[in-house]
Each structure stands twice: as structure tokens, then as C-alpha cells.
Amino acid sequence: MTLLYCFQAMPAWLALVMLCAYFVGIGVLLTWIGRRLTTRLSLPNNPTALGSAQSAIGTMTSILMGLVIVSLWADFRTARGTVSAEAAEIRSLVREASFLPPGSRDPLLLHLQQYVDAVVHEEWSAMASGGFANTAGRALSRMEGTAFTAPRDSIDVRARVNKLAELRALRLGQTNSGIVPVLWFTLLTIPIILIGSFALAHDANPRFHYLLVGLVAVAVSLALFAALEIDLPYRGAASVSPAPIALAIQAAQSDHDIGLPRNDAGEAAREPSAGSP
């Protein structure tokens, strides 16, 4: 799995080039071996049974990769929906907090801004490696404490804060919801068998034979590249963006004309990072 993580951490174009080089290289090697075995062992060129085997292996490969990509895309859309729901919950929380007395509203909005900052600037990068940010969890805990001590005669924001905590837990749980290693092994092995079947299809024109195998190898590489890029929804070039969460609190404050509490320097208060004195 370490090799897969390295591929997913690469720029998308580099990962695609390396996948193509790997499978094309295997295809060239298998074709070279297959042509020599066919000649030395006097095997028939393009036997009928080989065409049936190619069709069967190609069908299995297509079905397996298609099911995997469809499943991964569904998980990717689910993760994107979770982020959108978390952003909507933040906007709703800001709207309901605007009806609280200033003594409860200002601390709640302050902790909410600290939570959003921690999620966008710290937790998102940590989720790429399956982690999380402690600062986001601490900000959420302080937000829960403020919500549970706020007066509830006008409006109760506890349900919103609890829902926000549930959505964060759901988002963190989706960081490692990728393909299991056994399935990755199968996805990387079956294409080699498929390429090998075309390598055994001895053609009188070697250039055409190598070109045919190379095209099959490139097609396999593109399918695996698609699966690789959406395997983990918060990692890679096609990862889910934190933009909805980053913009949610700003949009809600603009809609309701609510400002953050400010410190003596006139700046919106922020929780200091772990490296700050």
C-alpha cells in the first residue's frame, strides 16, 4: 500500500506517465518473449482458442474495472455531499446564533471560525494521509461547551453543533474508505494476464504486434489511473475541495450582517497554532 500512496501523492500527469510506462514495458517484454516462444516451439499463429481466451479475459477485466470505478465514484460523490452538508450546517449555525444574546453569540461564532480555519488549513492536508487536526477537535469541543451553556429561551443551537460534530466524524471516517489491498492486487494482476494474451497472438508484422499490445497497455493504464485518482476522496488531484466549508461562514455572516469578535489589534480572533508561543 505504500507504493499506492506514493502514486496518489504524485502529480496526476506523472502518475499517468508512470502507469503507462509500467504496463507498456510489461507488454513489450511479454510480446518479445511470446514471439520467440511461438517461433522456437512452432506454436500456431493466432489459434482460435486464443481469441476466445482474449474475449473472456477482456470481459472479466472490463467488468471488474467498471464496477470498481462506479463504486469509487459513488463514494467520491458521497464524500462531496458530506462536505456540502457540513458547510450547510455551518451556515445554519451562524444564522441561528445571530438570535442569541451577544454574550453567547460572540464566543460561539469565535469558536466556529476557529473550527473552520483548523479544518481548511490543517485538517484537510492531514486527511490526505488518513489523519486529523487536534485544533479542529478542540475548537469543536469549546463550541459544544458554549452551545450547552447558552440560554435556550429564544433558540437552542445545541442540535446544530451536535449535527456538525456528526458530520465531521463522518468526513473523517471517509478518509480511508478506499480499495482494499486484495482488490488492488487483483486490479493490477488481471491486466497483465490480458496483455499477455495479446502478446501470444503472434502476427507476421512485428511492428503491428507491438503496437497492438501497446494500445491495450495504454487502455489498461487509463482505467487504473481513473481508479487510482478517486480511490481516496480527500487525496490526489481529483480530491474533494474544502471550498464549501471555507466559504460557508463568510457567506452566512454576509447574509445576516454578523461580524466576528475582534481582539485589541482589531483582527478577528484566531486560535494560535501548535507552533505559536
Image (cartoon, rainbow, N blue to C red):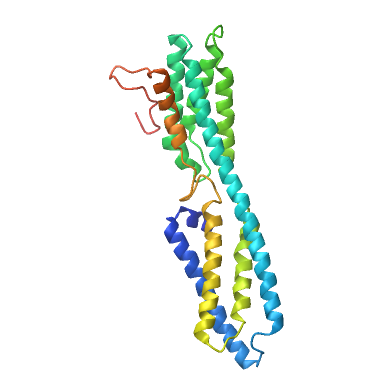
- Which of the pair 254/110 is nearer the observer? 254
Q: Is residue 147 left or right of residue 58?
A: left
- Is 240 situated above or below 3? above
- Is 26 situated above or below 224? below
Specify the quadrant of the image occupied by residue 256. top left
Residue 177: percent from left, percent from top: 60, 46
Residue 89: percent from left, percent from top: 53, 26
Q: Identify the residue at image location x=55%, y=11%.
A: 155
- Which of the pair 4/64 is nearer the observer? 64
Q: Identify the residue at image location x=53%, y=12%.
A: 149
Q: Is residue 63 left or right of residue 277?
A: right
Residue 43: percent from left, percent from top: 66, 90
Residue 114 showing in the rendered view: yes
Residue 133: percent from left, percent from top: 48, 35
Disc tally is 0
Q: Quadrant of the C terminus?
A: top left
Q: Identify the residue at image location x=66%, y=61%.
A: 63
Q: Identify the residue at image location x=43%, y=60%.
A: 14
